[in-house]
Amino acid sequence: MLETVKDLLQEVKEFSPNSEEEVEVFRLKFLGKKGKMNELFIAFKNIPNESKKEFGQAINMLKQNAQEKVEEFKGSFEAEEKRKQIDFTRPIALNNLGSRHPISLIKDQIIDIFNRIGFSISEGPEIEDDWHNFSALNLPEEHPARDMQDTFFIQTDPDLLLRTHTSSVQVRHMNNNKPPIRTLSPGRVYRNEAISARAHCIFHQVEGLYIDENVSFADLKQALLYFAKEMFGEKTKIRLRPSYFPFTEPSAEVDVSCNICSSKGCNVCKYTGYLEILGCGMVDPNVLENCGIDSNKYSGYAFGMGIERIAMLKYGINDLRLFFENDVRFLKQFSSL
Ligand code: PHE
């Protein structure tokens, strides 16, 4: 009898299944209701007393080993079965992939274009003080041009406000750096405007500043022509109209030729053939002096544009509010795939 148990122990030891079915057959053979173990426990009753101890130990060991084998292999073929059913050549499901926001896309494009002619990035705070947003930029208190940009002031501190343009970053940059300066300031700006298809209380700007010896208006014009061609296409023309900004003199507004109608006139360009994209000018010597730069030695140009405006022209979007509503049906259209 003991010999039989020893043989079974050996069989259990050598058991190495190849499938889930084999494990189940093994389990039934040893541990099932009509299995070997039950047979042996029944036979145990008839074992002479003096052998009971040895036989008992042997069948307990057999049971334990059989259980361990089942534990070891049970379910281990399931994962493999599932793996066999996977089709690894199937393309991955892309339907829930996100897309970049058009404002980010255009911002990066503008940065990239100016990077190529030596502009680097500077950033600053969105909550700004009066000096950096206005006074340093030749807009002293009570200056009527402050009304050009309707401002959100911080109620608890009349000196603080939400920046109305990123020119404030340029002031900070001039304070902390010596010419030559070539810097680009992208960022979010705030103005107290009623929200409509054409205006919003939050929008994004990129402003540029170049200061060195002998910087001229021709340099400004050339840089802007280069930008317009890179952004809107090789055939793009620009047009500068005299304008007014307190921090630049002379100042201009820049239009690009309408690429929707090839300047023939359409409802987007209001039959003028041109679209306004930015403001610019030669930095007013007062601004340079306010920021610790010798205006006799240095001159510079500055420009500023709204990213939303460029994105609207580039993508043919006719309502500014779409940029802020986060409607996936709108955003999905800018997926890069
Ligand atoms: N800061 C101006 C604005 O926000 C834009 C601008 C920048 C104009 C630099 C001229 C020069 O309207």
Image (cartoon, helix red, strand yellow):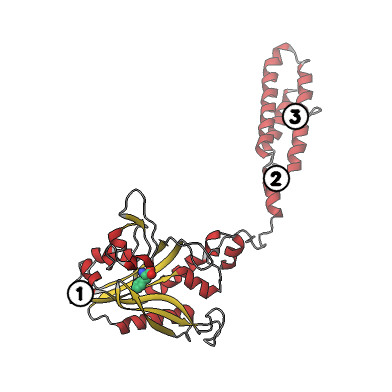
Q: Which residue is mark 1?
A: 295
Q: Amino acid at mark 2?
A: Glu
Which residue is found at the position 66% from the left and 59% from the top? 88
Instruction: Give the mark toward the camera: 2 or 3.
Output: 2
Is label 1 in a helix, a strand or a loop?
loop
Picture quadrant where residue 45 is located: top right
Q: Is residue 202 above or below residue 27?
A: below
Picture quadrant where residue 300 is located: bottom left
Q: Earlier in the sequence, mark 1 or mark 3?
A: 3
Is label 2 in a helix, a strand or a loop?
helix
Residue 118 % position (x, y): 33, 74
Q: Amino acid at mark 3?
A: Leu
Looking at the image, residue 45 sits to the left or right of residue 305; the answer is right
C-alpha distance separating marks 2 and 3: 21 Å
Q: Nearer the viewer, residue 135 or 127?
A: 135
Q: Quadrant of the C terminus?
A: bottom right
Q: Is residue 296 above or below residue 139?
A: below
Instruction: Give the mark toward the camera: 1 or 3.
Output: 1
Does the CB distance between marks 2 and 3 fall below 8 Å? no
C-alpha distance separating marks 1 and 3: 97 Å
Q: Amino acid at mark 1?
A: Ser
Q: Quadrant of the N terminus?
A: top right
C-alpha distance separating marks 2 and 1: 79 Å
Q: Nearer the viewer, residue 226 or 42?
A: 226
Picture quadrant where residue 163 is located: bottom left
Q: Which residue is mark 2?
A: 78
Residue 119 % position (x, y): 34, 72
Is label 3 in a helix, a strand or a loop?
helix
The local crowd at label 1, few if under 14, some if 14 to 19, many if 20 or more residues have their Cα within 10 Å, is some
Q: Give ligand 1's quarter of the image.
A: bottom left
